[in-house]
Amino acid sequence: MEKLTSQEWILIFTLVSLTALGPLAIDMYLPAFPKIAKDLNTEINNVQISLSTFLGGLAIGQLFWGPISDKYGSKKPILISMSIFIISSFACIYVQEIKVMWLYRFLQAFGSSGGLVIARAIVNKRFDKDQTLKIFSILALIGGIAPIVAPVLGDMVLTYFDWQHVFTTMALFATLSIIMTTVFLKEDTQTRVSSLKFRTIIGNYLRLFESKVFITYTIIGSLAFSCLMLYISNAPLLVMEKGGLTSTAFSFVFMINSCGLMIGSFLTSSILRKRMDPKNIIKLGTTIQILSAAVLLLLIELNISIYLQLVPLFTFVLPLGMLFPTSTTLALSPFKLESGTASALFGASQLAFTFLTSLLLNSLNDGSMSIVAIALVACAVISLIVNQTTYPKK
């Protein structure tokens, strides 16, 4: 494969600005939860609901923007979606009731989902499979910085300003995305779908389910995303409450594991894709996860030191950097003309799987970390089995 040109690198950084906006909007306001709750005279639990409405908007928005981009191209839908994000971000500054914030956070996510789904579609449309895997790995690598930087950036804003300016900062990031899109993103000239009728859109989504390859790697990508969310939501309990470490130590652990995910993405983009078939990259990643989660389960059952438990936790998170770009590439590559629709269903499926997995785990979990470790083993085992049943076209 030829090296990426300077123009292609500029395009990649433009796409990074679009894909990183969602994670930034999720994590940047987390340090402000107590202040928001106090100012809006509500409980922190109610502020946390705004995170749930954001995830809902992210799922629904992707299903909306995908077909739109297939019909009208990439540039205009991105500009409109980023404008929605900016307007709703500024609206969050003036909220007086928490329920109104729930609505605005939904609209924020609806806007940011446009950049996320269309960025994936752009990569799939404009590059061949080998380049696509490399670029998705780069996006995952650079995008992995967002969850690390966002809470720190939010805390810095809170040091000098009120919590409302966290949303001002989000709007500024979206403005930067608009500028980069306007200047650097060239509109694609490929043939576009002819209709946005509801029945046509639903029919296009249903046709994706006729592809065993798409179903297979959407399931694997969704299970990987579910693992990431299970890790994020349960890591504080494992590290601080069960392990007895401080919040500062937890932040360090979270940062190290995020770097692990980035290492997995780097290995995929620089080494693995040159030496292994994508299907075998997934096999390697899920095998590492199975072994890591099994060791973690054993250490939890034996009540071994938290410091030893952190080792298999790290080696479980690292392969996610291998699974995300590879599953995305394999799921979307057969659908060049319908990249937006395929990208939308792929992304929405990740959130749906995560919701169902969390719902199932919450119904079974009694506060034991063993159940979480079992869930991680199960997700990795299912991914490995599903991967071995499908042979994507080369």
Image: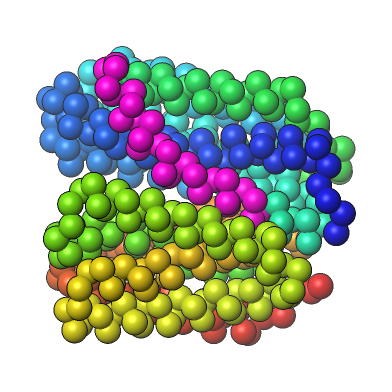
Looking at this view, is 212 or 37 the one in front? Answer: 37
| Looking at the image, residue 282 lies above or below residue 95 | below
* Residue 59 % position (x, y): 48, 47
| Looking at the image, residue 80 lies above or below residue 378 | above
Residue lying at 30% horizontally and 63% vertically, measured from the top left: 359
Looking at this view, is 392 or 263 the one in front? Answer: 263
- Tell me which segment is drawn in magenta: 136-162
Any magenta on residue 146?
A: yes
Looking at this view, is 147 or 74 the one in front? Answer: 147
Name the magenta segment's main secondary structure. Answer: helix
Residue lying at 60% horizontally and 74% vertically, measured from the top left: 282
Any part of residue 310 in sight: yes
Residue lying at 34% horizontally and 62% vertically, measured from the top left: 230
| Looking at the image, residue 209 lies above or below residue 344 | below
* Residue 53 % position (x, y): 35, 40
Viewed as shown, does residue 138 lie left or right of 31?
Answer: right
Any magenta on residue 206?
A: no
Asked which colour scheme the image uses, the reply is rainbow
Instruction: Tell me the quarter of the image containing the N terminus.
Output: bottom right
Viewed as shown, does residue 384 lie left or right of 294?
Answer: right
* Residue 332 % position (x, y): 70, 59
Residue lying at 32% horizontally and 51% vertically, measured from the top left: 252
* Residue 10 % position (x, y): 74, 35
Corner quadrant of residue 242: bottom left
Viewed as shown, does residue 65 lie left or right of 110?
Answer: right
